[in-house]
Image (cartoon, grey):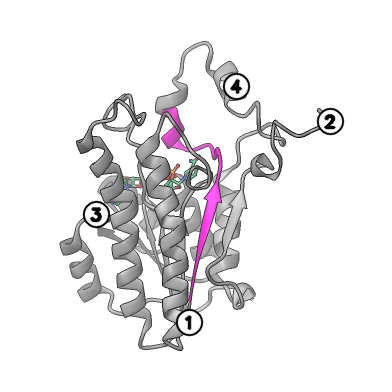
Amino acid sequence: MPKLQNKSALVTGGARGIGEAIARCFAKEGAMVVIGDVDAENGTRVASEIGGTFVALDVSSEEDWNNLAKQQPGIDIVVNNAGITGFEDSPGPHDPENATLAEWHRVHAINLDGTFLGCRYAIKAMRAKKAGSIINMSSRSGLVGIPGAAAYASSKAAIRNHTKSVALYCAGQGLKIRCNSIHPAAIMTPMWEALIGDGPDRAARMAAMVADTPLKRFGTVEEVAAIALMLASDDATYMTGSEVHLDGGLLAGSSASPGD
Ligand SMILES: NC(=O)c1ccc[n+]([C@@H]2O[C@H](COP(=O)([O-])OP(=O)(O)OC[C@H]3O[C@@H](n4cnc5c(N)ncnc54)[C@H](O)[C@@H]3O)[C@@H](O)[C@H]2O)c1
């Protein structure tokens, strides 16, 4: 029995990477999937391949969300996945001393404002059924400091906290609308390409990036989609305000462990 039969799901940033894998997984499990993205070319292609629909959606635009709400007034599942590191538009630096205010604002506008607007849309669109699942894509970077990507880390930490506010608000309203966050560490997607490059040292750079990860590898988009599916489905009806770490064991210990 497919786990998302008769459910409708919006996946933001579903045109590629983690969002694409979630969209494909949800469709395979019977959901009617709406992909919301700024990348119309890939978004339309993925949507047609999975029998879903594409909507042009800049998650930082309140107007775009209002338009989506008119098109899709009811929804069962919303995955607020769209996000940027800041390196897409500017090589940086993105550290606390040298990042520009404009870069700081842009990262927060997409990652944090986008998630706020997505949660607000979701609550209103789930009210009729008084039930639903909201999944916010935070990051391992929302749990620890990242000096080289300060705005990204700040935005992801705020997403973690807002997830809990949404969960408590919905529960307090007597709604069965659950809200949880996922915290992946390094997952191999196009987001990493700018950081890894395609030079002769690509393999060495990739290995260096996961050298501290106990499982010694990048995670896959399918591994993130499997967790999103669990949170979206009725397998997780007692989970709200929770955070799922998906990091190959990175946060399980500390390099300062006594006895090393
Ligand atoms: N890849 C990782 O290692 C990793 C780790 C932790 C968290 N995450 C988070 O997972 C999410 C997806 O990451 P990914 O690696 O698949 O990234 P990606 O860059 O491969 O894909 C991001 C998608 O979001 C879309 N997008 C960007 N700005 C948008 C906007 N304003 N409105 C709507 N769509 C927009 C892009 O077009 C793209 O389709 C992000 O929130 C990211 O921060 C990724």
Mark 4 is surrounded, within 10 Å at the Cα level, by few (under 14), some (14 to 19) or many (20 or more) other residues, namely few
Looking at the rendering, the stretch of residues picked out in magenta corresponds to 178-193
**Is residue 18 in sight in this rendering?**
yes
Q: CA distance from mark 4 to mark 2?
A: 24 Å
Q: Residue 147, percent across and down?
A: 44, 31
Kindly report which numbered mark, 1 or 2, lies closer to the viewer in this rendering.
Answer: 2
Residue placed at 71% from the left, 36% from the top?
215
Q: CA distance from mark 1 to mark 3?
A: 26 Å
Residue named by callout 2: 259
Residue named by callout 1: 171
**Pick the front one: 190 or 108:** 108
User: Would the CB of label 3 be found within 8 Å of ligand 1?
Assistant: yes
Q: Which mark is residue 134?
A: none
Residue named by callout 4: 208
Q: Which mark is residue 60?
A: 3
Whichever of callouts 1 and 2 sits on the residue coming sooner in the sequence is: 1
Tell me whether circle 1 and circle 3 mark residues in contact (CB < 8 Å). no
Horizontal side of 254 relative to 100 (left or right) equals right
Tell me whether circle 4 and circle 3 mark residues in contact (CB < 8 Å). no
